[in-house]
């Protein structure tokens, strides 16, 4: 799967089946979430607990699929050279609401350990920019994440 994705990024005009395109999109979104988690080079216990539930809700995944996706996303994220590799797939397939939900999930991960690292902030801001979200949308998603962190349901 990783080899096909590298081929796709090298030649974006490569024809993928609908199933391959869906897998590519899930992997790209999961990799963006992992970028936030690994921004401070450690995965906290809170982030490790939150990541699977965010993947199931943000990407509409079955909980059985999450472990494999996280493993593949770690490999993809480690081999990536830029956020653009991942945001390109998201831009091509997500509508504005889905992009906002992805950014919200990124903010929730960033605040999961109770501390926002400057690198987490930079990654989320850069991702929002690459997803063509307005600054006001970025701030709105951050405020929602902060409120959810302060008042968990």
Image: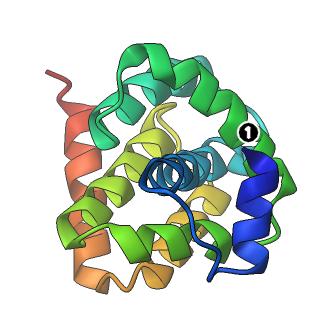
User: How are the residues colored?
Assistant: rainbow
In the rendered view, would you say 92 is above or below 46? Answer: below
In terms of depth relative to the viewer, which is nearer, 99 or 94?
A: 94
Q: Is residue 22 left or right of residue 79?
A: left
In terms of depth relative to the viewer, which is nearer, 106 or 75?
A: 75
| Residue 13, image x, y percentages | 62, 83
Q: Is residue 130 left or right of residue 150?
A: right
Q: Quadrant of residue 42?
A: top right
| Residue 74, image x, y percentages | 73, 39
| Residue 121, image x, y percentages | 54, 63
Q: Quadrant of residue 61?
A: top left
Q: At 46% across and 47% down in the image, what residue appears? A: 19
Q: Farthest top residue?
A: 64
In the rendered view, would you say 104 is above or below 126? Answer: above
In the rendered view, would you say 86 is above or below 46? Answer: below
Graded by Cα atoms within 10 Å as few (under 14), some (14 to 19) or many (20 or more), the crowding at tag 1 reads some
Would residue 43 be visible to someone looking at this image? no
- Picture quarter with the C terminus: top left
Residue at the disc numbered 1: 74
Q: Secondary structure at mark 1?
A: helix
Would residue 133 be visible to someone looking at this image? yes
In terms of depth relative to the viewer, which is nearer, 26 or 134?
A: 26
| Residue 70, image x, y percentages | 62, 31
In the rendered view, would you say 43 is above or below 99? Answer: above
Q: Is residue 36 left or right of residue 143?
A: right
Q: At 17% across and 29% down in the image, what residue appears? A: 151
């Amino acid at each position: 799967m990783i080899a096909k994705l590298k081929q796709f990024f090298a030649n974006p005009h490569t024809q993928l089946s609908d199933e391959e395109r869906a897998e590519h999109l899930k992997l790209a979104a999961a990799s963006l979430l992992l970028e936030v988690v690994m921004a401070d080079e450690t995965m906290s216990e809170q982030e490790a607990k939150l990541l699977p539930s965010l993947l199931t809700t943000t990407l509409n995944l079955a909980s059985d699929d999450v472990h494999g996706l996280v493993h593949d996303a770690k490999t993809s994220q480690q081999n990536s050279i830029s956020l653009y590799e991942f945001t390109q797939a998201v831009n091509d397939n997500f509508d504005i609401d889905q992009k906002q939900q992805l950014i919200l999930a990124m903010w929730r991960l960033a605040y999961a350990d109770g501390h926002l690292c400057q690198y987490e902030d930079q990654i989320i801001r850069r991702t929002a920019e690459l997803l063509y979200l307005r600054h006001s949308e970025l701030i709105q998603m951050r405020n929602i994440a902060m409120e959810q962190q302060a008042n968990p349901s």
